[in-house]
Image: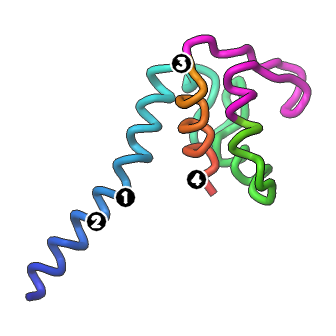
Amino acid sequence: MKRVLLTFAALAAVAAAAPAMADEAMAKAKNCMACHAVDKKLVGPAYKDVAKKYAADAKAVDLLAAKIQKGGSGVWGAVPMPPNANVNADEAKKLATWVMSMK
């Protein structure tokens, strides 16, 4: 019985991690990681810093999805974030949700 429970727990952990890995792969494929990293500032802020800044904002996913597609400036310094024409609305929302999961 213990073996069955351990196997089930391991499978559940893998399934829970899969969406996060898929969105990280999307971030790499859409060139987001050229300017951002999960835990350190590059050209743009670290995703963990973005999640922390917007943690209390109920509309954060929608706001960030719009910024992913349209770009933005002035929030994180002088370097503007260009729009990402390679990302559609659904992908932008998935990426923004992934970023906000970095708490």
Instruction: State the residue at coordinates (59%, 45%).
Output: 97
> Label 1 belongs to which residue?
16
Q: Secondary structure at mark 1?
A: helix
Q: Residue furthest bottom?
A: 1
> Which numbered disc flags the more N-terminal residue, 3 or 4?
3
Residue type at mark 4: give it: Ser
In this picture, is 22 found above or below 44?
A: below
Mark 4 surroundings within 10 Å by alpha-carbon count, few (fewer than 14), some (14 through 19), many (20 or more)? some
Residue type at mark 1: give it: Ala
> Label 4 belongs to which residue?
101
Cα distance in 3D space between marks 2 and 1: 6 Å
Most common secondary structure along the magenta stretch: loop
> Label 3 belongs to which residue?
31
Quadrant assignment, res 12: bottom left
> Which numbered disc flags the more N-terminal residue, 2 or 3?
2
Contact, CB < 8 Å: mark 2 with mark 3? no
Q: Position of residue 13 (x, y in %)?
A: 31, 63
Cα distance in 3D space between marks 1 and 3: 24 Å
Q: Is residue 70 magenta?
A: yes
Q: How many marks?
A: 4
